[in-house]
Amino acid sequence: MIRRLVSRPTGVFAVVVLGLLVVLAAVSLVWTPQNPFRADPFHQWEGPSAAHWFGTDAAGRDIASYLLAGTRTTVLVAVGSGVIASIVGIVLTAIGSLTARWVREGTAVLLDILVAFPTLLTAMLLTAVFGGSLGVVIVSVGLSFGVTIARVARGEIRRIARSDYVTAARASGVGGAGVLVRHLVPNAAPLFTVQLSLAMATAVLAEAGLSYLGYGAGSDTASWGTLLADLQTYIGVHPWSATWPGAAIALVVAALSLLGDAVRDAADPRLTTNDRASDRPATGGTGRPDRIDRINRTDPPTTTPGVTA
């Protein structure tokens, strides 16, 4: 599957960007060019240089160091929200697909109600009640998008549950949990993968948006959204400064969104079979290129001079 993943341009882009993000987050744990929180009033709004790769902001902080420290927050939010969304989505999907009819219908109504609330609005409500912190952002986004995953995957899980191999598994004595783990989740994995990548992308956007509005990570946590909020005030005077956090957010969100599509295409056996069939030349029973097109030609028959056809 790895080979099929990197054979697609979108897969290569997503793997490279996200791999670089993880490496930078690991590096920022032990090293940054400058102290990302140290203000230096004597070096305000300096341009890119050897000492300050992306320049400095209004407080004299090194923008490159702050961006590098912010990669830890981005990775933590994406992974944490993705894990919570996966657990919530799988549990709600199982309840809405494998239980009694009245439980399924009640779960469907509940999901329809909860999915009507936008993820960012739900996160804002929870952070307003419990206070702005990174943990609240992760939990709120994970819970909100877990409901979305359950609603999207419910129909696919029910379709798979009615298949012949699931019926045979139940007839052989496999319980509901065994059917879920062995058959339902693996066959619905491509759909879950796409939704999970969207959940992680939404989490990155939500954290940046909440930090931009002052509801996200605290002042002692480096966040791309907080940096973007600080720099956009001076965008008319120093337009280049806000480019860095904005480009970083857009790049990571695009990579996460494309990763789900690439993994789905690489993991779905129906798509990979079609790809192999389209790449394989048409062959007859002997393995040689098929000659049916020659048989079906409408060219007039050739005749030898002096011989009547």
Image: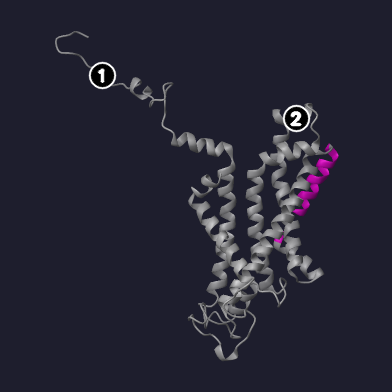
Q: Is residue 23 left or right of residue 99?
A: left
Query: Where residue 11 appears, x then y in whole percent?
Result: 53, 52
Q: Which mark is residue 169?
A: 2
- Magenta residue check for 243: no
Which residue sits furthest front? 30
Query: Where residue 84 appears, x then y in whole percent?
Result: 74, 56
Work out whether 207 lies above or below 300: below
Mark 1: give few (<14), some (14-19) or many (20+) Cα within 10 Å: few
Mark 2: give few (<14), some (14-19) or many (20+) Cα within 10 Å: some
Work out whether 50 lies above or below 268: below
How far, Cα to Cα, is label 1 from label 2?
A: 59 Å
Kindly identify the residue that appears in the image at 71 percent across and 77 percent down. Answer: 220
Query: Where residue 169 appears, x then y in whole percent?
Result: 75, 29
Work out whether 27 lies above or below 183: below
Q: Nearer the viewer, residue 302 or 221?
A: 221
Kindly identify the residue that appears in the image at 73 percent across and 63 percent down. Answer: 138
Work out whether 96 lies above or below 165: below
Q: Which residue type carries mark 2?
A: Ala
Which residue sits furthest top? 308
**Where are the magenta residues, as a range?**
101-119
Query: Where residue 34 appears, x then y in whole percent?
Result: 59, 80
Q: Which residue type carries mark 1?
A: Pro
Q: Which mark is residue 300?
A: 1
Which element carries disc 2, helix, strand or loop?
A: helix
**Which badge, 1 or 2, is on the more N-terminal residue?**
2
Q: Is residue 113 left or right of residue 71?
A: right
